[in-house]
Image (spheres, rainbow, N blue to C red):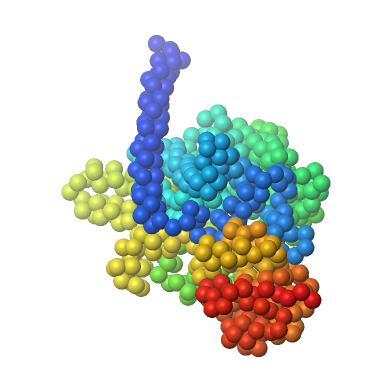
Amino acid sequence: MSLSTKRAARKPASGIAAVSAWSRFFPSLCAYAIVTVAAILALHIKGGGDYVGPDNDDVMRLVEVRDFLAGQGWFDLTQYRLGLAGGTLMHWSRLVDLPIAGLIRLFLLLGEGQERAEALALAIWPLSLAVLFMAAAGLGGRRLGGVATMHIAFGLAALSVFTSLKFHPGAIDHHNVQLVVMMFMAALMVGPHGTGSAHAGAGLMAALAIAIGAETVPLVAVASASIAVQWAVEGHRFRRSAQLFGLSLALSVSAFFLATVPPSAYGVVTCDNLSLGFYALSVIGGAGLFLVATAGGQAGIRNRFVLLGLLAAVVLLAAVVIAPDCLGSPLASLDPMLAELWLKKVSEAQPVLSQIRIAPETAGGFYAVGLFAVAVCLFRFFDFRHEDGARAGHHLLLGVLVAAALAIALIQVRGALFSNALAILPLSLLINDLRRLSHGEPENMNAGFAYIITVLVSVPVVWFFVGIVGARGLEAAFSMGTLTRSVTPMQEVNGCQAKDDMALLARLPTRTVAAPSDSGAEILRYTHHRVLSAPYHRNQAGMLTELHIGLATPQEAKAFLYGADVAIIAFCPSDAQTQELIRMKPDGLYAHLLRGDLPDYLRPVAPNMQGLQLFVVRPR
């Protein structure tokens, strides 16, 4: 029998094995998803409470979706009831609004009331994303190490979504979508090169991440650079994968740009969403990778790196010319007063040292798993580089991605969501290898111990549990509410955001309201009023005006109130920022309101109000 005949004879068997292996994927996914979703629902039903998540972004997303359903244009992202005259142009993508709005409209068509339709949609959407996140993790595990690694990845992902509020009912901000997209991108970048179709899918995911939000743009840049370097190292064997990744990125980001950016803004550069800046750099980088991989198909490794260096120089020059401001932080232009009184108090924006100082018991959960994954990837890269080049490459790629996410987490703790998620893939493979070693040598106690310890240190919630036990005791550590809130960095809820606090305000004639920024989104949700302040960096003017009103003496505050056309003050004594303003200026308006010393231009709406206290500004 000839060599070609032998190969042909082997193909059906290998094909059948592949089909058999992949046939286990979807039944396994369904099993993990059913158990996880049921556990989340049981926890949610037991906890009761609001059908909207506890994060300000969840509330604001619902407000935007309501406006979209009420007829606001696809390209019109202005929140007209937020900020000073003219409203505030938001930077979120309609790509996230669309499926949520579609679900709400579907339930309305089925006869549900508005609130019931919203509640169902806001439960289904994050739970669907939880299933997709598990699917992406399982896909990555399957491509890395087969069926056993796939099951471990499913298990780690299930624990991740169960303990993270980002996948619980009501969580409709875009971070859960970004987690799913990043996990799919990483999963498609590892595994056998094949025809390159997986890398084309990774390019699509990279473009979708850019279109959804700027938070993951650094990770996309690192992933794209990794693909380019991998082509320069491997040459012809990786050529098609690099070509398809670059082409898919360029074409997909073009489609998203045309679909979400109005023609009038094609020439506008912003650094917190998809605009000309990120679009141009993505197209130049993606199309450039396609061209250099095509032109350098027969080039040696030295010439491939020369081509890659030229492409990097072109992308950097384009960044300097087209979007120089985007090379720094999008919050660099934030007013110093807002940086001091707002941004430094935002939990998810804390750098590592501040996080350790504020809540040392959570530091391990945010940073330890990512650090462990990076160490594992580096160690295994050097261990495999002479024996198994593919495995070594996968660990290097995943190590770079996790390290990039961890670097972001060191600046802002919310980046830990991505480092912990991406760490699932390399740690699943390590756990599977240790499992095989332990089962192969049952008498070797060290192998079994290493396997158990590795499983434990690969789960962020274990680190949170140990930290909370050390800081608050066992009783607090066994509280799922404490654990889930620790796993997901978010602001503490003040006492003036509940529906009951807004009931009286909703009955007043529609006016402009001055209120603490943390209450702004809830006022937009529960009332028809316009509000000066909500915690979004594009609303600097409105936030600053509210701060100046609280800090100014009563007579000076009067000018601010009339100048901003404020007719109602919603005063919240328990709000942390309001308390800080009172501490800073004991003679300011908010300090006077706390003491009950009202200026003559203010009239209380109701005496002896608890929680949110309302004062009407008398006309000029």
Q: Observer-nearest residue: 256 or 60? A: 60
- Is residue 480 left or right of 246 when viewed as pictured? left
- Is residue 105 left or right of 363 when viewed as pictured? right
- Is residue 334 left or right of 159 when viewed as pictured? right
Q: Position of residue 542 (x, y in %)?
A: 71, 67
Q: Residue at x 44, y 58 (%)?
A: 49
Q: Residue at x 36, y 45 (%)?
A: 38
Q: Observer-nearest residue: 584 or 224? A: 584
Rendered-image quadrant of the N terminus: top left
Vertical side of 249 occupied by 586: above or below: below
Q: Observer-nearest residue: 486 or 282? A: 486
Which residue is farthest top? 1
Rendered-image quadrant of the C terminus: bottom right
Q: Position of residue 486 (x, y in %)?
A: 43, 63
Q: Is residue 259 visible?
A: yes
Q: Is residue 121 visible?
A: no
Q: Observer-nearest residue: 214 or 434? A: 214
Q: Position of residue 360 (x, y in %)?
A: 43, 72
| Residue 88 lies in quadrant | bottom right
Q: Residue at x 50, y 56 (%)?
A: 53
- Is residue 310 left or right of 581 when viewed as pictured? right
Which residue is farthest bottom? 587
Vertical side of 69 occupied by 565: above or below: below
Vertical side of 20 occupied by 371: above or below: below
Q: Position of residue 393 (x, y in %)?
A: 50, 44
